[in-house]
Image (cartoon, grey):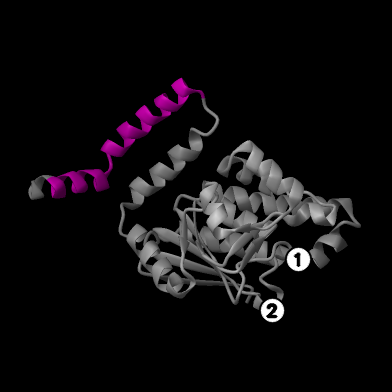
Amino acid sequence: MSIEYVAADGVARITLNRPDKRNAITGEMMSSLREALQRASHDSAIRILLIRGAGKDFCAGLDLSEVLKNAENADAAFASARRLGDLYIAMRRHPKPIIAAVQGRALGGGAGIATASDLIVATESAYFGYPEVKLGFIPAIVATMLRRAVNERQAMELALTGEPLSAPRAHAIGLINRVIPDAEFETAVESYASALAEQSATAMSMSKALLYETDGLSFEASIEAGVQANVQARMTDDFKRGVERFLKKS
């Protein structure tokens, strides 16, 4: 099975499971990952999604043998690219936060899966890269998330050089959230996911939606979106229970 799905304690753990190929992404894997995302979205017990890679690497990118084969047919190439684009959109629109836990290499489309996630944690020895230019290719779909995660010049340099980026450097430019010592990674990832799973599901979902909704809006439109979300949040049961707990402690 190229995608493993295990749900427990409010966390859906999704594993890219093709370690012999460094978890290189095939069309079948993209479809299976979309199914896993949908499964988690319909499970009210799930609050957080955690995406991992089996073996030493997170994901080496698209399976190049499949990409090359599709290049011989324009319709097949378009379908493959569309499938990847739709996967990234599904991750961005997913109602629950998605964490990418990266060890080893996250390259090309694999870096895209990490970048499309809402939060990224990585081992100190991990590195990220968009090496498509070295193959005469371009990080065309991934660029959408990359440009939103880092500034324009950083994104341009990564796309034009294709050079790998260490986890500490990725953290320094704002691409990832946390860098964790390799020896502590497993425990730290579980603690990180578990802590988030204890937060209000509605508050997290609304926060994710609002942050992405305001991307690209004018200042005034962004404030208005915040006003609307503020009012909606006041009406939720989670908010009412949270305030009641707070007042009892006061």
Identified at 82% across, 52% down, the residue is: 137
Determine whether 217 is above or below 26 in the image.
above
State how far apart marks 1 and 2 are (Cα): 12 Å
Identified at 45% across, 41% down, the residue is: 209
The kind of residue tagged 2 is Asp
Q: Is residue 233 visible?
A: yes
Q: Secondary structure at mark 2?
A: helix
Mark toward the start of the polypeptide (1 vs 2): 2
For the stretch drawn in magenta, the main secondary structure is: helix
Identified at 70% across, 44% down, the residue is: 157
Residue 241 sits inside the magenta stretch: yes
Q: Secondary structure at mark 1?
A: loop
Specify the quadrant of the image occupied by residue 196. Answer: bottom left
Q: In screen coordinates, is 12 left or right of 133?
A: left
Rate crowding at label 2 as few (under 14), some (14 to 19) or many (20 or more) other CA atoms within 10 Å. few
Determine whether 99 is above or below 242 in the image.
below
In the picture, the disc for residue 63 is: 1
Residue 191 position in % (x across, y down): 36, 67
Residue 247 position in % (x across, y down): 11, 44
Residue 4 position in % (x across, y down): 55, 73
Q: In screen coordinates, is 80 left or right of 218?
A: right
The kind of residue tagged 1 is Asp
Q: Which residues are magenta?
A: 218-246
Residue 123 sits inside the magenta stretch: no
Specify the quadrant of the image occupied by residue 102. Answer: bottom right
Q: Is 239 or 134 nearer to us in this picture?
A: 134
Disc 2: which residue: 20
Residue 142 position in % (x across, y down): 67, 49
Q: How many marks?
A: 2
Rate crowding at label 1 as few (under 14), some (14 to 19) or many (20 or more) other CA atoms within 10 Å. some
Q: Is residue 76 visible?
A: no
